[in-house]
Image (cartoon, grey):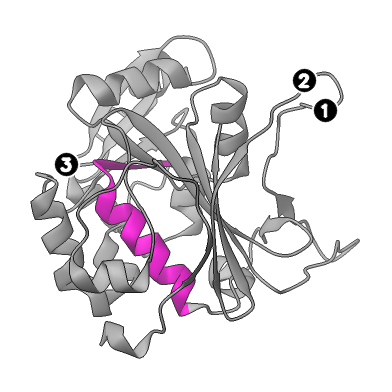
Amino acid sequence: MSRALAPLELLYEPAGLPAFDLPVELGRLYPGSLGFPADSLFANFVSTVDGVVSLPGVPLANRIIADASEADRFVMGLLRACADVVLIGSGTLKGSPLSDWTPDAVFPAAAADFRELRLRLGLAETPAVAIVTAGEAFPLDHPVLARAPLVLTTTAGASRLAGAGGSAEVVAVSGGERVGLAEAVAALRARGLRRILSEGGPNLFGSLLAAGLLDELFLTLSPLVAGRPNELGRVLSLVEGVALLPGRRVAAELHGARRHGSHLFLRYAF
């Protein structure tokens, strides 16, 4: 039952934010406003206090970083329930061998309320899935391929992925060696997938940010400290693969702060 989860505590929110008509139980658990313009791209991450968002090669790393927070999983499900499509990269696909990126999967206690919200918003029963990949080392046996995801790739990547497993639709959005993210977003919007939730890793997030495509970030701040291992392995921070400071200032405006125990749930607009 979702009532086993205590509501998040609203600490700050500016007036005038878009607000969907949430089902009663979702509004109780997530007080304040939650809504998005018709065309929006928003990302969701959980981070340790010292800024670590990924432990490559560690099973269930996301849940470890979140300190097994059910509130974090609820917010993840709620954001999925608002989206036309969930956008991921091939690294996230490979690192999540059992995921299907549906709201119910991460917080099944609110499954009926998530479905009601999507009905109110005029959305399909579950969000679509889109995968950004150059086509190399693509896991053709991933179960999400049975959900007919869009695979957004390059011309060369489309050749590599000819006959990809399941019912995936492979779309070449750009030439060259890297997928053009502006073209990828345009391809989604051309298919009516206008509200895009990015659950990709820090490389995809950094590229979206650097390209000026990101509208909002939902950041769960876990009370854990990860540290930086030496010979034991790598950790990844929120943005990887893109240099910003000191040459480029990218700043966000705080659009919300909520608390659940020792976890903070922050919302930023770019």
- Extreme-top residue of the structure: 175
**Of residues 16 and 120, which is closer to you in this image?**
16
Q: Do the residues under discs 3 and 2 have CB atoms within 8 angstroms?
A: no
User: What is the number of the mark on residue 248?
Assistant: 2
Apparent side of residue 1 relative to residue 119 in the rendered image (left or right) = right
For marks 3 and 2, the one nearer the N-term is 3
Q: In which quarter of the image is the C terminus?
A: top right
What's the distance in space between the residues labelled 3 and 1, CA to CA? 42 Å
Residue at 72 percent of width and 49 percent of height: 237
User: What is the number of the mark on residue 167?
Assistant: 3
What's the distance in space between the residues labelled 2 and 1, CA to CA? 5 Å
Please tell me whether residue 166 is drawn above or below residue 52 in the rendered image. above
Query: Which three-letter amino acid code belongs to the residue tagged 2?
Result: Arg
Q: How crowded is mark 1: few (under 14 residues within 10 Å), some or many (20 or more)?
A: few
> What secondary structure characterizes most of the magenta part?
helix
- Extreme-front residue of the structure: 15
Q: Residues within 10 Å of mark 2 (few under 14, many from 20)?
A: few
Residue 223 in which image quadrant: bottom right
Mark 3 vs mark 1: in front: 1
Residue at 49 percent of width and 39 percent of height: 216
Residue 6 in which image quadrant: bottom left
User: What is the number of the mark on residue 245?
Assistant: 1
Residue 154 shows up from this direction:
no
Residue at 67 percent of width and 47 percent of height: 238
Q: Where is residue 68 in the image (x, y as percent from the top left)?
A: 54, 79
Residue 74 is inside the magenta segment: yes
Disc 2 secondary structure class: loop
Apparent side of residue 67 relative to residue 90 in the rendered image (left or right) = right
Q: Position of residue 176 (x, y in %)?
A: 51, 10
* Magenta-drawn segment: 70-89
